Structure formats: structure tokens, C-alpha cells
Image: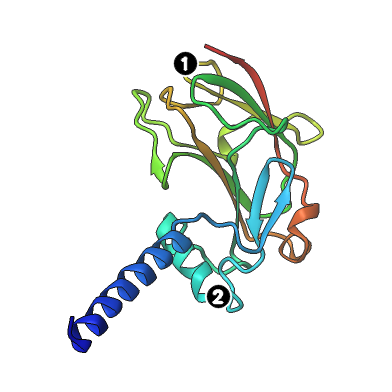
Amino acid sequence: MKAWQRYAIFMVLGLVGGTAFAVQQVRGGLSDGVVPNGPWETGKSFGTLDASALTRAKVALSGLLALPAKEAMYFTATRDSDGRKLDGRCSYDVRGGTLDGRWWSITLYEGEGWLVKNAANRWSIPASAVSTDAQGRWYFTVSPDAQSGSWLPTGSVDAFDLTLRLYHPAADIIKNPEKAQLPIIDRKGCA
């Protein structure tokens, strides 16, 4: 084999290997710099100038379309409050209280940022769709079956995640998202 052929083979192998590694890193989820808070996770650098090129690529790939942190913070849950993966064949109560921001919504996604197909055409619960008691507590149900009150359908998918968007969060939440009072996710039962 001639020298130029060896060089060509090694160049192709290097390009293929480097590309595979880069794709694996970007598709690896938003795990670098993640801050946990109960079943929720966020990143301190999402939507900031401090975000690395890898974080920006991951945010772009996930479809998060992150606004600057002072305008919105994003918390994602892939597990319930007991640490079990969120399963679309199960029902959950999502309960919370006053969130320290101007407005919030929780959206249900399947897999890589896709909305779940469902007959009810519901994908998100905004703050305005839940009733609160005198202490500011609220709840809604996530379930494959229709529910009364505020409800998000899972479409009976194998796995899903919830994304909490907190718009105009308080400075304390931006600085210490691990201390924010976020909703709990309780599994009620599975079909």
C-alpha cells in the first residue's frame, strides 16, 4: 500500500471517528452543568453568555430555544419525585405552589423534544389553567386517560418528560435554581 493511501485511510477514519464522537456528545442530553432540584433539572448556563459551544449545540438540538436566563428558566423532569422514569401508561399528580416568577407553563414532550400526539390536542398547562387555593397551592393531572379539571394527556407513550418554563424568574432562582420551590410529581397508578 502506498503512503498516500495510508494517509487517506487514516484521514477518513479520523473524520468519521471525530464526527461520531461529536454527534454522541451533542445528542448526549443536557447533562453538563446540570443542577438538580427534586425531579427537576436545569442548567445555570442555559440562555447565558457563559454557555459553552457544546451546551449551545445541545440546547439547539433539544428545541429548547432558550431565552436569556433573566427572561426564562427551563426545568426538565424525566422522573417522578420517587425517582421512577415518567411512563405514559401511568397517571401522575403534579402539585406545586407559588412559583417565584411572573408566569409559568409545563409542557409534556416525548423523546427528543416532540410534542405527544393526543386526541385532546393538549400539550401544555399554563399558570392560568390551574385553580389555586388560599395558600397558592395548585395541581393538575398527567394521564393517558381523560381527567376532569386541568389535565395533560400522555398518549400512552413509553416515556415522556415535562418542561417547566418559568418566565421572568426572581434573581434568587437564577442564582440558586437548586433552592427554588418547584412542583412535585407523584405517580398515582399505572394501566
Q: How many numbered marks appear?
A: 2
Q: As drawn, is 147 to the left or to the right of 123?
A: right
Q: Quadrant of the N terminus?
A: bottom left
Where residue 141 appears, as percent x and y from the top left, is 58, 24
The location of residue 116, given as percent across then percent down, is 39, 34
Q: Nearer the viewer, mark 2 or mark 1?
A: 2
Q: Which residue is drawn at 18% across and 85% down?
A: 2
Instruction: Work out which residue is located at the far bottom of the displayed protein and give it.
Output: 3
Q: Which of 156 and 71 is in front in this view?
A: 156
Given the current orientation, which residue lies at the most extreme top position?
191
Q: Which mark is residue 146?
A: 1
Secondary structure beneath dot 1 equals loop
Which residue occupies 34% across, 23% down? 119
12 or 181, nearer to the observer? 12
Residue on which disc 2 sits? 52
Mark 1 belongs to which amino acid? Answer: Ala
